[in-house]
Image (cartoon, rainbow, N blue to C red):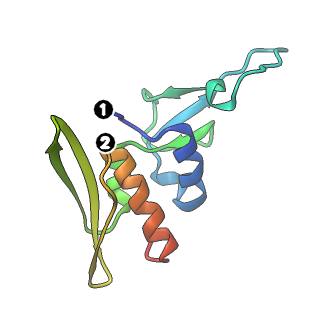
Amino acid sequence: MKAYTDLEQSEKLAEILPLESADQTWARIVIAGANLDVPEELQYKHNGDMPFKYYSGVGVPCWSLVALLDVIPQVKLDNIMQYNKKHWRCCSYFASDWHNSDWYDNPIDACYEMILKLHEQKLL
């Protein structure tokens, strides 16, 4: 199961969320004098064993499931089994209404969509 936001999701969330809410990071791989001719997503490695709790300003901030759940108001995760596979949906009760994400095969993607939805509606 996906344990944290991927690089693309992390870059988008960095534009929306306070950087202090990130609890992990994507660190850029630097080789002195090398001109890396590879896609950008291959130029980063995930560092989940950071010696600090919050994003330090180095690399691209990254969010675990716990960190994502902390920024969504009155959140709950739903899951269902369908065709022997678990699917997840993120739900948030805000402004006297339930807001639901689509169903995803992991809770990270469901929470990511919920954050984007709430941000678009100016509820986050």
Compared to 122, does 111 lie above or below?
A: above
Determine the image quadrant of residue 42. Answer: top right
Residue 106 numbered mark, or none: 2
* Quadrant in the picture for residue 100: bottom left
Measured in 3D between alpha carbons, the distance from the residue under mark 1 to the one under mark 2, in whole angstroms, is 6 Å
Q: Quadrant of the C terminus?
A: bottom left
Check disc 2 and report its element: helix, strand or loop. Answer: loop
Relative to 38, residue 63 above or below: below
Nearer-the-camera pick, 33 or 54: 33
Q: Which mark is residue 1?
A: 1
Name the residue type under label 1.
Met
Residue drawn at point x = 18 percent, y = 50 percent: 79
The answer to whether 86 appears left or right of 109 in the picture is left
Q: Does label 1 or label 2 sit earlier along the sequence?
A: 1
Rendering coords of residue 53 (x, y %)? 42, 40
Q: Nearer the viewer, residue 105 or 44?
A: 105
Q: Is 117 situated above or below 21? A: below
Residue at image coords 20%, 40%: 86
Residue 9 location, x and y as percent?
52, 46
Residue type, label 2: Asn
Which mark, by number, is residue 121?
Answer: none
